[in-house]
Image (cartoon, rainbow, N blue to C red):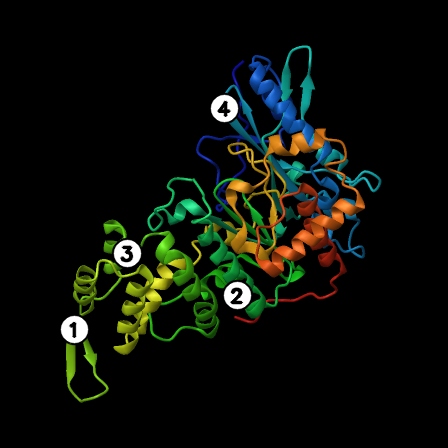
Amino acid sequence: MDIDTPNKPNLDEFDDIKFDTDDMFVDSTVPTAIPNNIYMDDAQIGPTEYYDRLKLRKYYQELFPFDILVDWLTFNYDPEKESINDYYSKREFSTRYVVKSKPFVIRNKSFPTVDEEIKSNDLKEFVLGTVDEHTFTAKVPEKLDIGPVYSREPIKMNQYQDYRPVERELVFDIDIDDYNDIRVCCDGTSLCKKCWQFLSISAKFLELYLKECYNFQHILYVFSGRRGLHVWVSDRGALTLSKDLRQKIISYAKPGFEANQTPILQRAFDEIFLPSFENYIVEDQELFTMESQIKKLLDLLPGEIKLNKKSGKKYETINVRVLVEDDLKENPNQAPLDKWKKIKNLLLENDIKEYLYRIVFHYTFPRLDEQVSIGLNHLLKSPFCIHPSTQKLCIPLDIDLIDYYDPNDIPTLPKLLSELDQKGSTNPSPSKMDTDQKKSRKSKSSKQAPPTNFNYYKSFFKNYVNNIKLSKSNPNPLDF
């Protein structure tokens, strides 16, 4: 069957929407688009793919925390202005299907009601898709994405002229492949414990920056399932930020090439960036043991530079890059960290600290996908999704333990279903829950690896949402 693609909405009005180049857009506002083109004529999948979809469906049926998710996405509704159903009906959801090896993104989905007895019932049915055992047909979406709250129901967007995004969590997207030019432990979209530190450093900076500068308190860090980190700021003040203010939040955090940094960047440099660079990056990324890495570092140093020596009135010209390069050749067996400290001291002693900032920021400063943060109508993968490529769970992360997560030890779909098949493993007894909580507290105090039990992550997410709901504060960003 040929697949018809409905006309896209006017993207001039939504210039910050990004689509994967391999994805075909399907507009759910066209009544016949989904049933006629996505859910039909997909019976000729192989047995392996069919059973894989059944496994994914089982996870969403029995484990995915739809109730907590909807609590999170509806906490900001104002009962004096509208009902919770009206508010919830304006939130956009999106899914991605694969039909005959061709991916399809369904946007502009919304649901009219929140079932108070079985919350998110319509959303759950949407994500579960359909299964026909007689034809071995399973139409189950690969993932669930979350969009903004609009002025009108997304499913009816074509009926209104004033359709626009009005609320959106302040979000940040950090992908490890944006660090490919400075990491040597992995390449492409691969992620290991060593290059996890790039993401960890970014999270710790955002935690400091957003709390100290804007008083945002409700920040959720989520592993994307494969190559990165998603950050959700859910404070009421964050939800209503304009596009311009989001841009200013991004811009204000950027370091300049100068000896005097803003107070927040100076603090972050002293507390996060420099210690992380020296404790992790120097050795883990082989800055002084691989010729290619040495060259990249040398390129960040100045060549000939005229210095105003404090001991006299005359200027002195030195070539910092040559001095460092000669020293590295003369002392090849020196420990990497000692080599770095000699460079750092050289820069400080000659009062050219801007080059110290330049090097450290180059290797440690967050490499954000800025358009995701600035635009109000970008989609972002829901927490607790299963990544379609890795089968890993998109877990919420405890910022206090962010250094100690191992991307190779994240729960996977097979592991979750295996635990589900073991009686009581996904609904542990109070004693087991106590053990998980004790392990979490022990992890924080002794800096061990975080727990990997599903219920630990679910409980963590629930506590995050409850704290938002209990908070009566409505912090607004500082004046710019």
Q: Evaluate whether residue 298 shows in this view.
A: yes
Q: Which mark is residue 209?
A: 2
Disc 1 versus disc 2: nearer the observer: 1
Badge 1 or badge 2: first in the primary sequence = 2
Q: Residue furthest front?
A: 333
Against 414, residue 325 (above or below) is below
Q: Amino acid at mark 2?
A: Tyr
- Tell me residue 467's x, y (percent): 72, 58
| Image disc number at residue 102 | 4
Front-lying residue, 40 or 209? 209
**Residue 318 - label:** 1
- Mark 1 to mark 3: distance in Å? 22 Å
Compare marks 4 and 2 and give the one earlier in the sequence: 4
Q: Given this view, does label 3 or label 2 mark the residue nearer the observer? A: 3
| Nearer to me, 71 or 434 | 434
Position of 332 with respect to 64 (left or right) is left
Q: Position of residue 476 (x, y in %)?
A: 63, 67
Which residue is disc 3 drawn over? 288
Amino acid under label 4?
Answer: Lys
Residue 177 or 289: which is nearer the viewer? 289
Label 3 CA crowd tier, 10 Å (few <14, some 14–19, many 20+): many
Q: Is the Cβ of the residue at disc 4 closer than 8 Å to that at disc 2?
A: no
Q: Earlier in the sequence, mark 1 or mark 4?
A: 4
**Can you tell which of label 4 and label 2 is closer to the viewer?**
2
Asked if the residue under mark 2 is in contact with the one under mark 1, i.e. CB atoms within 8 Å, the reply is no
Type of amino acid at the residue the image marks with label 1: Ile
Query: How far apart are the two marked residues, 3 and 2, measured between alpha carbons?
Result: 31 Å
What residue appears at the point 66 percent right and 53 percent down from the top-left corner?
A: 440
Q: Secondary structure at mark 2?
A: helix
Report how far apart the C-alphas of labels 1 and 2 lie in the structure: 37 Å
